[in-house]
Amino acid sequence: MTRQEIIDFCLTFPNTYEDYPFDKVKDENACTVMRHKLNKKTFALIQRHGDELYLNLKCNPAEADFLRSIFKSVIPGYHMNKRHWNSVIIGGDVPVDELKRMVENSYNLIKPKVKKEMKLIVNKNKCPQNHKCPSIAVCPKGAISQKDIYSLPEVDNEKCVLCGKCMQFCPKGAFEKI
């Protein structure tokens, strides 16, 4: 693969961009850093070292050692943490499909983790719905409302910061995080 083919392949992953933090001129000799847009973490670093093109990729330590043992052109990460990064000398003995798998693995290691979104609900079996909800007054973001004193309180989960004050204040324990 050429330098541009590596860059183009890296850009096929969601929310990625190329960066040149170490060079003023973007050319064949520049150090190209491929990053994730949301967390700005690096997953590939493309640089010339002498006459050779190096591709630094993040890797879990066990796989890093394994890849170094089977490919002569995979070495400990040049100018990187040797435990978590490998350098692949482009044009060596790593097949293109394997190189692409290694790039994808590196990307997957640095991409932001998707957290299960937590939200707050009102358990209608616990709420008597016969009074003005006292938790409305303690919500710091105004995320709890009630149409009238005989209705179930509603939570606007866009405003709610899950501070838990409503849960502590509700005498019936009707507020629950799910």
Image (cartoon, rainbow, N blue to C red):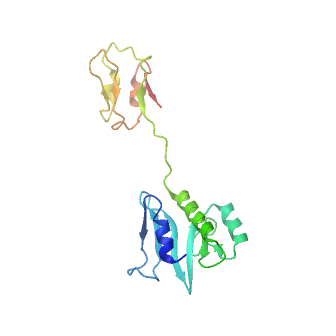
Residue 17 at least partly seen: yes
Of 132 and 98, which appears nearest the observer?
98
Q: Position of residue 148 (x, y in %)?
A: 26, 18
The reply to whether residue 79 is in sight is: no
Q: Percent position (x, y) of residue 91?
A: 60, 79
Q: Quadrant of the N terminus?
A: bottom right
The image quarter containing residue 143 is top left
Residue 42 position in % (x across, y down): 49, 65
Q: Residue lying at the far right in this picture: please name it.
A: 69
Q: Which residue lies at the image location 68% right of the left edge and 67% below the top edge?
A: 67
- Position of residue 121 in the picture relative to residue 76 (left or right): left
Residue 159, how many percent across, how many down?
33, 37
Q: Give left or right: position of 150 versus 126.
A: left
Where is 110 relative to 176, above or below? Answer: below
Q: Residue furthest bottom?
A: 51
**In terms of image quadrants, where is residue 88?**
bottom right
Query: 156 above or below 47?
Result: above
- Residue 90's place in the image compared with 154, above or below, is below
Q: Residue at x 41, y 79 (%)?
A: 23
- Vertical comparison of 123 with 109: above or below: above
- Residue 60: quadrant of the picture: bottom right
Q: Single out the residue that lies furthest toward the left.
A: 148
Count of marks overlaid on the render: 0
Instruction: Determine the residue positioned at 56% across, 73% down.
Output: 55
- In this rendering, would 60 be left or right of 11? right
